[in-house]
Image: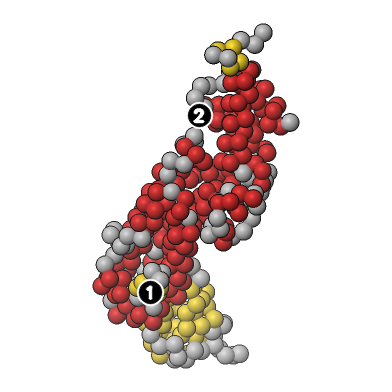
């Protein structure tokens, strides 16, 4: 028997709530457009379209924005951490070896994680009749060697030394400038992508505008940026002067490293800003819109959903999530019935 309250049956209330929940789920998770998100590397390409046209094409602009933003912020965090001296695997901890006189010996570094400075003295090169004779002086101790080949795998460093002529050369530890420049380019690109996505989605709510304001805030003053080859162009994009960066690394490596990846460095600041964003809830990122007010997912929660090619696989999880966030909790009976309606 179906009871009624104020002329409205409990069945009507149930049917209405199920319908509303279904529409909310369709809106929030894009069930009407399975696999719409994550199909392109830059989802922001359609964020500039109107809500009406986006809706008619089956694309949810809020979800598209969140997916693009989450991807861009993660890329920014990863790129910044490569330049953070306190993070493992950072480019400032990846050394290479150089030779002060390459006419005596050349060095090819394979992998080096610590300083390794020594001197090589070549007495004679290897010939068909005679082996090469050379000595290595390290930490005040000299050891004499012979080799049938002029190409030698060093035992005191993960490197190969090729003897070129007689004489003495100093082998010194250096940092691979190419790696640093490449990492800086990656960070600039990731940051600009993030700002592009934020600008494209700023009409989605006050939360996005706040994100845009925060992410566009100074990561360092103009003087510091200029010292390491960074500046903003007339469009507000971050740009890198590679020649200026290389010059800074050669003239004052320690200061340049500190400005980029030190405790209060540019990359360190940007990486922490990205991590803060990734830990925030969707509602704080987009704002109190219908699409997100019923959920409390952080960016990591969205990541697991967007990773699915078939969102239908998540129906049971979706039901569980929404049953907790509705004005009242559904019983198991209603949950099963609602699920059947969805799958039907």
Which quadrant of the figure contains the C terminus? top right
Residue 173 in the image, given as x and y percentages of width and height: 38, 74
Which residue is tagged 1?
Answer: 234
Residue drawn 47% across the image and 50% down it: 204
Asked which quadrant contains residue 23, the reply is top right
Q: Which residue is mark 2?
A: 325
Residue 205 vertical placement versus 167 (above, below) = above
Mark 1 to mark 2: distance in Å? 45 Å
Tell me if residue 204 can be seen: yes
Q: Residues within 10 Å of mark 2 (few under 14, many from 20)?
A: some
The residue nearer to you, when weighing 151 against 233, is: 233
Residue 31, image x, y percentages: 65, 41
Q: Quadrant of residue 343?
A: top right
Q: Residues within 10 Å of mark 1 (few under 14, many from 20)?
A: few
Position of residue 216 relative to residue 128, above or below, is above
- Is residue 298 visible to us here? no
Q: Secondary structure at mark 2?
A: helix
């Amino acid at each position: 028997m179906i009871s009624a309250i104020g002329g409205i049956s409990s069945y009507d209330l149930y049917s209405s709530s199920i319908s509303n929940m279904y529409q909310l789920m369709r809106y929030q998770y894009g069930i009407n457009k399975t696999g719409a998100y994550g199909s392109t590397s830059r989802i922001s390409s359609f964020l500039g379209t109107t809500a009406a046209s986006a809706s008619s094409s089956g694309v949810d602009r809020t979800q598209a924005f969140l997916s693009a933003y989450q991807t861009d912020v993660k890329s920014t965090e990863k790129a910044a951490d490569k330049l953070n001296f306190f993070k493992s695997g950072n480019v400032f901890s990846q050394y290479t070896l150089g030779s002060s006189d390459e006419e005596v010996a050349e060095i090819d570094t394979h992998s080096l994680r610590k300083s390794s400075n020594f001197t090589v003295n070549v007495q004679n090169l290897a010939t068909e009749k005679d082996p090469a004779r050379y000595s290595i002086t390290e930490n005040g101790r000299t050891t004499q060697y012979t080799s049938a080949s002029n190409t030698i795998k060093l035992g005191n460093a993960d490197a190969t030394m090729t003897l070129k002529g007689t004489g003495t050369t100093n082998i010194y530890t250096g940092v691979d400038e190419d790696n640093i420049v490449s990492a800086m380019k990656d960070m600039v690109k990731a940051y600009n992508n993030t700002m592009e996505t934020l600008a494209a989605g700023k009409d989605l709510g006050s939360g996005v505008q706040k994100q845009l304001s925060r992410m566009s805030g100074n990561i360092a003053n103009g003087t510091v940026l200029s010292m390491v080859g960074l500046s903003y162009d007339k469009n507000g994009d971050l740009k890198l002067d590679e020649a200026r960066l290389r010059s800074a690394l050669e003239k004052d490596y320690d200061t340049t490293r500190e400005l980029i990846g030190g405790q209060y460095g540019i990359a360190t600041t940007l990486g922490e800003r990205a991590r803060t964003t990734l830990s925030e809830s969707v509602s704080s990122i987009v704002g109190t819109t219908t699409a997100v007010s019923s959920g409390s997912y952080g960016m990591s929660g969205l990541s697991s959903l967007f990773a699915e090619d078939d969102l239908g696989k998540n129906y049971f999880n979706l039901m569980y999530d929404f049953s907790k966030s509705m004005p009242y909790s559904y019983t198991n009976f209603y949950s099963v019935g609602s699920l059947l309606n969805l799958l039907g």
